[in-house]
Image: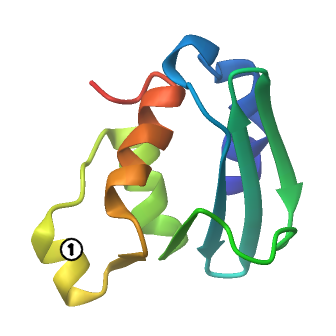
């Protein structure tokens, strides 16, 4: 499931939603991915390919799938309980918007 989500990202990318280059590192159980988005496109790489990603997201594969597939949007409770962890939660909203998942 996760591999398909990340493999499909470049095709789902909405360049007009992004004005700067941002790097994301996702740690989702055994799945680790670096995603870079910019006005020029989206790249997905296996593992951690940047020393300091602009935004780090750590959660379970199941919770990530809930967000991506089911439209669940984490709230303060999810972050406070540690269900999802991020150094920049607002940047995760930008990520969703860049793939048309902000509705």
Which residue in the rendered view is the most extreme toward the front?
A: 20
Q: Residue 39 is drawn in which quadrant?
A: top right
In the structure shown, which secondary structural element does the residue marked by tag 1 occupy?
Answer: helix
Q: How is the image coloured?
A: rainbow
Q: Is the residue 52 above or below the residue 16 in the image?
A: below
The reply to whether residue 19 is in sight is yes
Percent x, y of residue 7: 80, 40
Q: Is the residue 43 above or below the residue 89 in the image?
A: above
**Residue 78 horizontal side relative to residue 28, left or right:** left
Query: Which sits in the foreground, 9 or 30?
Result: 9
Percent x, y of residue 11: 75, 20
Percent x, y of residue 32: 74, 72
The residue positioned 31% from the left and 39% from the top of the image is: 71
The residue positioned 70% from the left and 31% from the top of the image is: 38
Q: Is the residue 52 above or below the residue 96 in the image?
A: below
Q: Residue 97 is drawn in which quadrant?
A: top left
Quarter in which the C terminus is drawn: top left
Percent x, y of residue 92: 42, 52
Which residue in the rendered view is the most extreme toward the left?
A: 77
The residue positioned 45% from the left and 44% from the top of the image is: 68
**Residue 88 horizontal side relative to residue 6, left or right:** left
The residue positioned 67% from the left and 39% from the top of the image is: 21
The residue to which callout 1 is attached is 78
Mark 1 surroundings within 10 Å by alpha-carbon count, few (fewer than 14), some (14 through 19), many (20 or more) = few
Query: Which sits in the foreground, 4 or 40?
Result: 40
């Amino acid at each position: 499931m996760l591999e398909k989500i990340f493999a499909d990202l470049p095709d789902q990318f909405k360049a007009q939603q992004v004005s700067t280059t941002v790097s994301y590192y996702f740690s989702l159980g055994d799945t680790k991915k670096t995603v870079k988005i910019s006005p020029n496109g989206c790249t997905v790489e296996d593992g951690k390919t940047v020393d300091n990603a602009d935004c780090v997201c750590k959660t379970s594969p199941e919770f990530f799938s809930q967000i991506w597939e089911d439209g669940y949007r984490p709230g303060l409770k999810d972050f406070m309980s540690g269900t999802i962890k991020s150094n920049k939660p607002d940047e995760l909203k930008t990520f969703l918007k860049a793939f048309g998942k902000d509705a």
